Amino acid sequence: MRTGWLSSFRLRPARVIASSLALLLFAAAGVYATNYTLWINGRSNTAQPGNHADFTYWGPASTAAGVNKKSVNWDGFSRVSDQNYRVRDALDCYCTGTNWCYIAAHSAGNLQIGYALSLYGGSARSKKNATPNASGVCGNSDGTTQTGWNIKWVDVAAGAGGGSELANVGSWAVSDPLTSDLKTATARALYDHNQTRAKWFYMYAGAKGTLYSGVLPGQDDEAVAYHSAGGVSGSGGAGFCNPSDWFCNDLKLGTAANEGGKAKWSYHTVAFRDDAEALNHYTNGNWGGVVSKVRADMAANAN
């Protein structure tokens, strides 16, 4: 446990160094960057897709949640591949040219940012002017392109990158196309989770499960288990728990392999593990649950 904690701690200064170097380079060239914080929602979003000012999914828009915060707003209902263009539109808008982004994602938003980086993060992107139209699309800035996006790091609350057993057994609405992508085998095969374009994913895992979430292995937040929220690698889910649980392998903090030897995906580190079992999956319209931990991190460090 101590090794995992140190691994996570040592990664934090790298974020500060990367930000400082970028600012120094821009200042030396006489160009000043604008930083943005993008929030990528999970399923069941009632906000207007493409409206980057609508924080209905998260909570009050007045709440501090990172510099120049924007709500990406995909529909939270369709297949990841069908709605990923909205995520790419937002990344193009705010994370190209001289502008840089901090990314926060919740639940299936983990799949959306992972999918975008893995499949499109090495592609040519037109530099945009950070002024979106009603559909969330920005105009070109200078007519040039760049490879991928300018992203400092990614914070993930209750990540569904590894899928959920609730989708496997049909606990969610079968009419919801997204449920097909959230099945554990499907989510883990949707893209190469190790290909993050060297962007760090800081994973925040909640553990306030309930009796009806018994289908989820190990510790869970009522919707996703630690194997997903903790970025555990492999083709299927397994049970991982807090150190206080003697009957289950520990989810280790930081980048360390978990108890039993199971590794995390590349560039994934567990920044928060809910040892107190106090945080569930849901925002409750007020930046609640494990999202509260990511919001606090963004408010303190995304500047």
Image (spheres, rainbow, N blue to C red):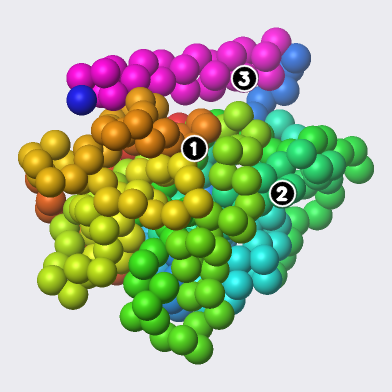
Tag on residue 22?
Answer: 3
Give the amino acid at mark 1: Trp
First to last magenta residue range:
2-28
Give the amino acid at mark 3: Ala
Taking the magenta stretch, the answer to whether it contains residue 5 is yes
Q: Residue at x 66, y 45 (%)?
A: 118
For the residues labelled 3 and 2, the Cα–Cα distance comes to 25 Å
For the residues labelled 1 and 2, the Cα–Cα distance comes to 16 Å
In the rendered image, the vertical position of residue 84 relative to residue 66, given as above or below: below
Of residues 146 and 166, which is closer to you in this image?
166
Neighbor class of circle 2 (other Cα within 10 Å; few <14, some 14-19, many 20+) is some
Of residues 266 and 104, which is closer to you in this image?
266
Q: Does residue 203 appear in this view? A: yes
In the rendered image, the vertical position of residue 182 relative to residue 19, given as above or below: below
Q: Residue at x 66, y 25 (%)?
A: 32
In the rendered image, the vertical position of residue 299 relative to residue 51, given as above or below: above
Q: Which residue is mark 1?
A: 265
Q: In the figure, is residue 203 to the left or right of 275?
A: right
Q: Position of residue 260 (x, y in %)?
A: 29, 34
| Residue 261 position by quadrant | top left
Query: If you read the primary sequence from the N terminus, does the residue marked by circle 1 or circle 2 appear first?
Result: 2
Q: Which residue is mark 2?
A: 119
Q: In the figure, is residue 31 to the left or right of 179?
A: right
Give the amino acid at mark 2: Leu
Image quadrant for the C terminus? Answer: top left
